[in-house]
Image: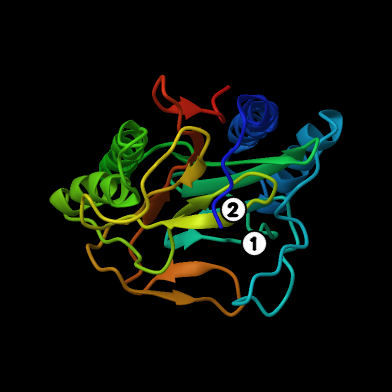
């Protein structure tokens, strides 16, 4: 069931979105060679705590997971696509890092992700991130009343495929509101003009994930959470929580 939010509810989600944006900015600022992923999680925990927010990630256990998620961010490095668990890994110069974070404020959720390189970026990683960001922007631009979910999916997929990148088929965006994951699912590839009609008051987490090697295949790591590219190539992930409004897409997780 898709919940249509009131304008006041979208404003409340914007408050959660600001906390997410602040946490992502703080984590990115703290990321440097030698810093442990676990330390980045502590940075995000501090931002959430000081804002009076809670984490929808911590303790989350969907049907595919054997154990609850133990952190407030997903920290996915290099060939990790999404859902990386922050551990004692120390960042290295040139690592490509994707950080996903959520926050709940007064019962409303926000969810966003960003990818960046630590230290010296490889040109191929810069291109991968730029294309993934453009795919996100295209998906957001398609999120208008009267369009369909497939229009968002097609906008994202067209950019990713044209650049020669892979797209994991089983993971994509989703509705968001009182819970982090709500209906409808928002695939990262699809046919235009298909799927649910978008209405004012819907809120979606739009999140392209692109794989540098051009293959769609991935596997679940031994931790039961981290998705890794099957060919060992790198991945990038960008995400925003977006409200569908008559005035156009409203990004709720901007700074």
Q: Is residue 234 left or right of residue 173?
A: left
Task: Place residue 238 in its image quadrant.
Answer: top left
Q: Residue at point 33% right, 33% down?
A: 137
Please state the horizontal and vertical placement of residue 102, each as a whole percent of the image.
66, 44
- Is residue 34 visible in this depiction of the protein? no
Q: Residue at x 50, y 48 (%)?
A: 98
Q: Is residue 191 visible?
A: yes
**Proximity of marks 1 and 2: CB atoms separated by less than 8 Å:** yes
- Of the numbered discs in the image, which one, if any, rests on residue 75? 2
Q: Position of residue 183 (x, y in %)?
A: 53, 56
Under circle 2, the secondary element is strand
Q: Residue at x 58, y 55 (%)?
A: 182
- Percent position (x, y) of residue 44? 73, 40
Q: CA distance from mark 1 to mark 2?
A: 6 Å
- Residue on which the image places disc 1: 85
Q: Nearer the viewer, residue 5 or 129?
A: 5
């Amino acid at each position: 069931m898709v919940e249509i939010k009131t304008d006041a509810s979208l404003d409340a989600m914007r408050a959660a979105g600001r906390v997410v944006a602040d946490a992502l900015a703080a984590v990115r600022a703290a990321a440097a060679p030698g810093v442990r992923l676990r330390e980045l999680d502590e940075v995000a925990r501090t931002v959430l705590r000081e804002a009076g927010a809670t984490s929808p990630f911590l303790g989350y256990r969907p049907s595919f997971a054997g154990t609850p998620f133990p952190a407030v961010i997903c920290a996915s490095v290099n060939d990790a696509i999404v859902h990386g668990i922050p551990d004692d890994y120390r960042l290295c110069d040139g690592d490509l890092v994707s950080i996903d974070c959520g926050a709940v404020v007064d019962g409303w959720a926000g969810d966003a992700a960003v990818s960046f390189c630590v230290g010296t970026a490889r040109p191929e990683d810069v291109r991968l991130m730029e294309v993934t960001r453009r795919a996100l922007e295209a998906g957001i631009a398609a999120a208008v009343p009267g369009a369909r979910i497939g229009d968002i999916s097609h906008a994202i997929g067209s950019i990713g495929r044209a650049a020669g990148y892979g797209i994991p088929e089983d993971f994509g965006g989703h509705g968001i509101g009182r819970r982090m994951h709500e209906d409808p699912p928002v695939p990262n590839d699809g046919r235009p003009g298909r799927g649910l009609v978008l209405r004012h008051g819907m809120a979606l987490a739009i999140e392209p994930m692109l794989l540098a090697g051009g293959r769609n295949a991935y596997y679940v790591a031994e931790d039961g959470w981290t998705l890794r590219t099957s060919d060992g190539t790198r991945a990038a992930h960008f995400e925003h929580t977006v409200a569908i409004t008559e005035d156009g897409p409203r990004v709720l997780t901007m700074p």
